[in-house]
Amino acid sequence: MRGKGDFVRPKRRWYVLLLSGIMFTFILASATNFVKGDSIDPGVYSTNSAPYGIPYQQWTERWWQWDYSIPTAQHPRENFTPAKCASGQHGPVWFLADSLSGTVERTCTIPAGKSILAGVLTGQCDTSDPTLHNDQDVRQCATEGNDYGVIGATLDGVKIQNLDQYRIDSGFYNITIPADNIFKTKPGTYRSFTNGFFVFLQPLHPGTHDLHLTVSVTNPIKPTYNYAADWTYHLIMKP
């Protein structure tokens, strides 16, 4: 069993909400990635886009692989330090960790020109869990906690609409889990499924930006999913 904060949560079903009522401001750099932003929200990649030639859903798989790949002591989700924000980062997209309880502030220095992918409400399950007997079980495990919650988000204080429409399935893929991982999952390569809501930003202008996220989940079917978190990223986009 895994937990968010002090309450029990089913194995590796980690959810951070992105439904309606989300606020963002997008201060964008000139695009080095020529994929267009979403028609509803310029500056946010649409779920049918392929940033840097890779389909959006594969980036969500990569976010989860990154989340597992970082040794526990260096993981940016817990006991955060600015240096941890750079853990495991490589390539054109910078991954931001979620928060599972309380109120936290995090300062991250990110090279200008990087896109930014934050998992907001997302669940992942795989065949390392012996209670999951087939693909249907794995998919249900990854998706069932993503239907309830109230969220707020701002980027430099300005609102964005309709991010509740950004829910996406990864499809099935193989995930490789190292021995030292934050979820204490048995190492190996497993058949996996990811579902949820991600914020995928095109590059921001050099300078400072504040990304503030709040979530309160009240699941009437499985209360073990319930939690609240409030976290702010102070992003320093460095030329």
Image: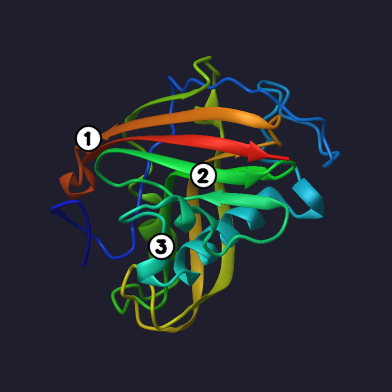
- Image coords of residue 46 (percent x, y): 68, 35
Q: Quick one: SS at disc 3?
A: loop
Q: Looking at this view, is 125 or 2 the one in front?
A: 2
Residue at 50%, 28% in the rendered image: 210
Disc number lying in front (3 or 1): 3
**Image vertical order of residue 122 relative to residue 3, above or below:** above
Q: CA distance from mark 2 to mark 1?
A: 30 Å
Residue 10 as seen in the image, left or right of residue 35 = left
Circle 2 residue: 108
Q: CA distance from mark 3 to mark 1?
A: 27 Å
Quadrant in the picture for residue 35: top right
Residue 31 as seen in the image, left or right of residue 63 = right
Quadrant in the picture for residue 101: top left
Circle 1 residue: 218
Residue at 49%, 71% in the rendered image: 69
Circle 3 residue: 75
Q: Earlier in the sequence, mark 3 or mark 1?
A: 3
- Image coords of residue 112 (percent x, y): 71, 41
Question: Which residue is most to the top?
Answer: 158
- The amino acid on which the numbered mark 2 sits, given as a three-letter code, is Cys
Q: Earlier in the sequence, mark 2 or mark 1?
A: 2
Disc number lying in front (2 or 3): 2
